[in-house]
Image (cartoon, rainbow, N blue to C red):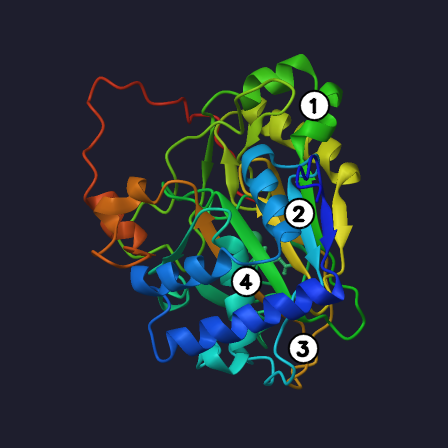
Amino acid sequence: MELDAGDLDEVTLTHDEAVLMRSLCAEVVEALGEADLSTQAAMTTVELIGCRLPERLVAALVSFRCNSSSSGSLLVRNVPVDERLPATPADGYLPDWRSVGIATAAQLMAMSHLGDIIGYADEKHGRVVQDVAPIAGAENQQENSGSAYLELHTENGFHPYKPDFLSLLCLRPDHDRSGRTLTGTVKRVHPRLSKSCVATLRQPLFRIQFSSSFAQLGSSGYSEPVAVLAGPVDDPELTADFHAMEPMTDQARQALDELEAVLTPSLDSVVLDTGNLLVVDNWRAVHGRSSFTARHDGTDRWLRRCFAVADLRRSRGVRLAGSRVLAPLTTILADRPTAPASMPLPDVTHSVSPR
Ligand SMILES: O=C(O)CCC(=O)C(=O)O
Ligand SMILES: [Fe+2]
């Protein structure tokens, strides 16, 4: 069997592979029973059973983990999900993961090959698999509960422990199949960026506003200044958010606008369908979503999202022993040593208001 997946953007599981994966999912559900998913014990169970996933799928995930892909994403089709799905959760919060146990196990097993799965106490009660569904009244929110165009972003780019990978598993597409998930990477477009733009994007002249679930009273509400680009010239790491990122100088604003103008026509887009798992390299690609119309009738678009980090030990001090859930961001920041007084602060005199 050819196991070097190379630069692969897509894998479709064969019938036999999907049957094997479904039986492993059932095994995970059975083994976990009533267990709390956000514990190390549950993740060990997932990982052990996940070692037996179809070799072709594991090879693609391992290759993506180590080499990424030219699009910064990997789409896996024909992933098993539960035969009878409950209604799309109207409040974006499924009471019990076991009602979609097969899909949950499938996503966790796949993600366990990309890194260690984590959740954030600030988001959906720290769940390690979260529901992404449109919420009535939140249509225009720049959050995954909205249905308007969701601008391109690095997931939790403002967070000191942002995920290295995220995945979105589709349980239901929207009725009109117009909600397209978008991904974009600088690897594709770097020759089209001007030299001065690249030089500016490599400086820490940008700060990112915390998304609402992470912003608590008393916090500054912004990340430390960050650079948009880092690392290799022809395949840089990218941290961007075209909604929540605030350039701190006029030059930084121009550079971010140039990046957005160059990136937008180059995007990959996919209408995720039932059983499609999209994995995104959160260091190489930004993602977003086109608009769609929600009906709030129990059959709306429904994705489930999961995060993984390459090095779980980095966050040891901000998790309880045996837990995969990171403490609230305000607690993490409050416990951090303050910057030495001599550290120069970026010039914020030309700051512009966020879009
Ligand atoms: O709805 C989508 O396709 C993407 C949503 C998203 O960006 C997220 O849940 O992080
Ligand atoms: Fe996102």
Give the image location of residue 329, x and y in percent.
31, 51
In the depicted structure, whether residue 9 falls above or below residue 293: above
Res 77 quadrant in image: bottom right
Q: Nearer the viewer, mark 2 or mark 1?
A: 2
Task: List the residue tagged with mark 2.
Answer: 74
Amino acid marked by disc 1: His
Quarter of the view holding residue 121 = bottom left
Q: Earlier in the sequence, mark 4 or mark 2?
A: 2
Amino acid at dot 3:
Asp
**Neighbours of disc 3 within 10 Å: few (<14), some (14-19), many (20+):** many
Helix, strand or loop status at disc 4: helix
- Tell me where residue 284 appears, x and y as whole percent: 59, 35
Among the two numbered marks 4 and 3 on one chain, the one whose residue lies closer to the N terminus = 4
Q: Residue at x 57, y 15 (%)?
A: 199
Q: Which of the pair 120/222 is nearer the observer?
A: 120
Mark 4 to mark 2: distance in Å?
A: 13 Å
Between 312 and 335, the residue placed more toward the observer is 312
Whether ligand 1 has any atom under 8 Å from the Cβ at mark 4 is answered as no
Disc 3: which residue: 300
Within 10 angstroms of label 2, few (less than 14), some, or many (20 or more) residues?
many
